[in-house]
């Protein structure tokens, strides 16, 4: 059976955002594919049910069922702007509900099914007007300069399409959630005058007919999402800038943390950070949390208690929903970038508390009940093997080794470093790192590690590199490399390092610490934390909270005189998270010092282009990594 090729990106179909029909008999979801012409990603709404082949419903994304299950609302582009459409499920053509000048957001049905709320952009868009900023949040990666555009809460009447805006101000409202009586909506927002400096975000409620929003929470939680579930307001967010996201219940005097007994980070879901919004499962709350690289589903009583894992295994959950006693979810595994599953609730599980040693993910309930089969059945994939290494100070460091186990003798090794720094590698297949599989087929070993600051290993580990980027975690990379060299897996003369975002930072940092790497490939890198603090859309947060304010010793640029490694810089031209100036500074510094270096800039590409950017850029990114490694490590032609 052949191995995967980079062009197989165009054969991948990745489901997301599963929404079970109210009767639990079927699941609507978004299916994303990459297309050559036009050069972009394509979203469609599909429907899957037990015993039937999945079928396409419409172009678009964000499917949401009406309470009676007779209508499906979703987003589809109209003249370049996303608008809410309504599809009657008993037949007929879809109807456009909104005509928002700047586009609508994901639809949220009212309990009675007569209205749909959404959070969408508001303001006057003039691309030629001067950009005036009084706060630090005047730009955002993927959106660019916001030019005074804010995100506000709107409500549209389903019958007439009449739309009213419920909020107004210089803040960005999160996705709203309806109260069970349909009279109010809750949402998150940072309305405080210095919220951009303190990273404050609170929960607010506004009457469905309009009025002044009422603040419901204070500084006890940095609210990132809110959901009205079973008459209770559930809030997700950390209690400090660098720390786990936790679940909270809104009481009369503010938010109270919901006890789960887990020392794990709650994952509500975001690009590059898979998870699922909390959902009500009878008297239980369903939520997602990161565990040793994987993202799993748990339930816990709404009154608090010990969480029970209901979906585990070596899998990454990316979206979940509950209806009529059925749990629908999407999960990636070692063979598939994602499948849609449907199962009964409750399915049982293993109880875990913070006082116990959590079991290996492979020993917990694995995904079952797949309704789809999107895995590429005609290619053979290498499977990552979980390993635990020990750093120089005795700290356990978990990682994954991907290689052809039939090969003998030491071979070339690529160390790939994840971003964040609070992300984590998982033993699952994904389309963003196809070069892993290609390199393994060519005799390489690919080592992915979850060092200090990685997610899924407890909050102390999560915070272990705060204020000590590079200083705390260097040993977490070099020690495992030494082990694999000693074991005869890696050839010490054929080592290379790459990484994206924080991984790009660490790639540059490691090249200042050691000359053992024959090639370095930082993507979306951070090289100068001083300039980063004033130019990134998250610069102040990174400088003051992640790095503790004293950023010069933690900046690779401070130590650039020690670099000799041939370096390939790959960077999105419109990256506002790690601005392209970070790569430009490193490129200029190495060029001035005579170090072999190349800079590749991807026009129009934001920070996450390796996940959701133009397919041509994503293919090129993979190709250039492989070519640079061939040129500088294995001696093959570039």
Image: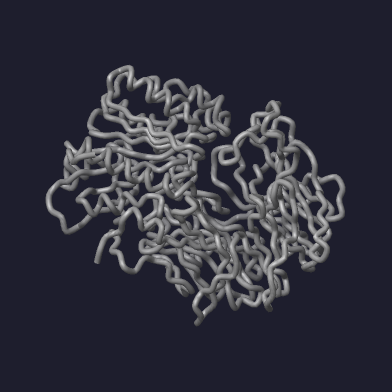
Horizontal arrangement in the rendering, residue 144 relative to residue 459 (left or right): right
Q: Which residue is farthest bottom? A: 51
Which residue is more in the foreground, 523 or 275? 523
Q: Quadrant of residue 472?
A: top left
Vertical position of residue 534 compared to residue 90: above or below: above
State the quadrant of the C terminus.
top left
Name the residue nearer the viewer: 1 or 152.
1
Does residue 327 appear in the picture of this structure?
Answer: no
Residue extending farthest to the front is 37
Q: Residue at x 63, y 33 (%)?
A: 145
Residue at 32%, 26% (x, y): give it: 512
Q: Residue at x 28, y 19 (%)?
A: 594
Up-down relation of residue 277 to residue 556 (above or below): below
Quarter occupied by the N terminus = bottom left
Instruction: Work out whether 454 lies above or below 532.
Output: below
Image coordinates for residue 429, horizontal then vertical, percent: 38, 57
**From where the camera sits, is residue 269 visible?**
yes
Q: Is residue 100 left or right of residue 553?
A: right
Position of 380 with respect to 456 (left or right) is left
All told, the count of numbered labels is 0
> How was the colour assigned to the protein in this rendering?
one colour
Horizontal and vertical percent for residue 583? 42, 29
Among the 4 quarters of the image, the one containing residue 107:
bottom right
* Residue 276 spot, x, y in % from top left: 56, 58
Q: Position of residue 83 (x, y in %)?
A: 69, 55
């Amino acid at each position: 059976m052949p191995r995967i090729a980079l062009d197989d990106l165009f054969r991948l179909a990745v489901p997301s955002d599963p929404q079970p029909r109210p009767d639990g008999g079927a699941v609507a979801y978004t299916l994303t594919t990459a297309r050559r012409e036009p050069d972009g990603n394509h979203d469609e709404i599909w429907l899957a049910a037990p015993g039937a082949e999945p079928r396409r419903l419409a172009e678009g994304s964000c499917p949401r069922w009406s309470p009676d299950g007779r209508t499906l609302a979703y987003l589809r582009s109209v003249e370049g702007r996303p608008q809410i459409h309504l599809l009657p499920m008993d037949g007929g053509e879809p109807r456009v509900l909104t005509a928002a000048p700047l586009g609508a957001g994901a639809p949220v049905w009212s309990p009675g099914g007569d209205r749909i709320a959404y959070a969408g952009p508001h303001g006057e868009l003039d691309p030629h007007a001067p950009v005036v900023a009084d706060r630090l949040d005047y730009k955002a990666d993927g959106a660019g300069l916001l030019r005074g555009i804010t995100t506000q809460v709107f409500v549209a009447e389903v019958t007439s399409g009449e739309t009213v805006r419920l909020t107004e101000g210089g803040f960005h409202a999160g996705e709203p959630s309806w109260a069970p009586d349909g009279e109010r909506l809750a949402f998150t927002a940072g309305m405080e005058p210095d919220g951009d400096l303190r990273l404050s975000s609170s929960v607010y409620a506004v009457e469905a007919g309009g009025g002044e929003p009422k603040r419901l929470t204070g500084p006890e939680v940095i609210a990132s999402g809110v959901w009205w579930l079973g008459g209770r307001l559930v809030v997700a967010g950390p209690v400090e800038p660098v720390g786990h996201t936790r679940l909270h219940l809104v009481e009369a005097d503010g938010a109270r943390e919901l006890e789960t007994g887990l020392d794990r980070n709650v994952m509500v879901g975001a690009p590059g950070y898979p998870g699922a919004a909390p959902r009500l499962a009878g008297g239980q709350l369903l939520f997602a949390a990161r565990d040793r690289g994987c993202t799993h589903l748990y339930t816990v009583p709404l009154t608090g208690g010990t969480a029970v894992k209901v979906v585990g295994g070596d899998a990454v959950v990316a979206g979940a929903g509950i209806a009529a006693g059925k749990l629908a979810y999407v999960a990636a595994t070692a063979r598939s970038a994602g499948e849609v599953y449907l199962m009964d609730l409750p399915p049982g599980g293993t109880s875990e508390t913070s006082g116990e040693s959590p079991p290996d993910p492979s020993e917990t309930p694995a995904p079952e009940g797949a309704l789809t089969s999107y895995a590429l059945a005609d290619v053979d994939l290498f499977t990552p093997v979980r390993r635990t290494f020990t750093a120089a100070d005795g700290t356990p460091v978990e990682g994954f080794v991907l290689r052809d186990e039939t090969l003998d003798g030491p071979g070339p090794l690529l160390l790939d470093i994840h971003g964040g720094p609070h992300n984590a590698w998982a033993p699952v297949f994904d389309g963003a790192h196809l070069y892993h599989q290609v390199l393994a087929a060519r005799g390489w070993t690919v080592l992915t590690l979850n060092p200090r600051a990685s997610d899924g290993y407890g909050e102390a580990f999560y915070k272990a590199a705060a204020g000590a980027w590079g200083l705390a975690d260097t040993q977490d990379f070099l020690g495992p490399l030494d082990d694999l060299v000693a074991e005869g897996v890696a050839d010490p003369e054929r080592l290379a390092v790459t990484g994206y975002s924080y991984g790009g930072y660490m790639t540059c940092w490691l090249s200042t610490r050691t000359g053992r790497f024959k090639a370095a490939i930082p993507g979306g890198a951070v090289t100068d934390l001083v300039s980063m603090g004033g130019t990134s859309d998250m610069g102040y947060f990174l400088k003051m909270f992640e790095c503790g304010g004293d950023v010069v010793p933690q900046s690779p640029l401070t130590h650039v005189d020690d670099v000799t490694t041939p370096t390939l810089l790959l960077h999105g031209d419109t990256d506002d998270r790690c601005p392209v100036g970070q790569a430009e500074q490193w490129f200029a510094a190495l060029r001035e010092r005579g170090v072999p270096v190349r800079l590749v800039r991807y026009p129009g590409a934001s920070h996450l282009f390796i996940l959701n950017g133009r397919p041509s850029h994503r293919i090129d990114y993979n190709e250039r990594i492989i070519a640079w490694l061939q040129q500088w490590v294995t001696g093959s032609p570039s």
